[in-house]
Image (cartoon, rainbow, N blue to C red):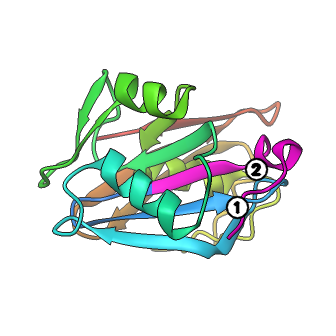
Amino acid sequence: MQSAPQAETSKLALIADVGHNAMRLGLTDGDGRLRRETIRTFESHEQSSISGAFSSFSRSCALEELPRRCAIAVSGAAVGDTISVPNSRWFLSRSGLTAMLQAPPLILNDFAANAWALSAPDSDARIEAMAGAPLSTEEPGTRCLIGVGSGLGIALIVRDEQGRINVLPTE
């Protein structure tokens, strides 16, 4: 992949999903949509650090430099400067990534990221109800999202009467 022209590069974003066994990295296009051909997976036994995986990703995509815009969904509580990934040797340093990218990254809990994606007006994601009628995030109310994987993810989506959305992560 060749480096895009400067005007196009400024619209790109690096996105990451960091779990305890692996991290997936990808790039967005000018409209903020994931470019599937850029997705790369790095296993924890292959990369000793998050910044190392970012550098490997940059090389594998033949980027001259990483985009300054970056969003990272991390399993675990996304608080403080140093964020430990549960059950992993990986950690994220907000200040270190800010220095590397020359801009502060957005770092949020992975399940909160899922909840925000589900509540986006143009999302084609669906919520599977555990019981009762299918749920819609377009109506006012509070929904509790629960996901079981290598851990337990829980987030609340709250939509008020004016249509404003707030996501409450838990960890």
Above or below, 50 relative to 150? above
Above or below, 151 relative to 36? above
The answer to which of 4 and 154 lies nearer the viewer is 4
User: Where is residue 34 drawn, in percent x and y?
Assistant: 68, 65
Q: Residue at 42% of width from left, 53% of height from top?
A: 55
Q: Quadrant of residue 23?
A: bottom left
Q: Quadrant of residue 132?
A: bottom right
Disc 2 designates what residue? 139
The answer to which of 162 and 23 lies nearer the viewer is 23
Disc 1 designates what residue? 136
Stretch of the chain drawn in magenta: 1-16
Q: Residue at 19% of width from left, 55% of height from top?
A: 48
Say if the magenta span includes residue 99. Answer: no
Secondary structure under badge 2? loop
Q: What amino acid is at disc 2? A: Glu
Whether residue 89 is visible: yes
Q: Residue at 22% of width from left, 69% of height from top?
A: 46
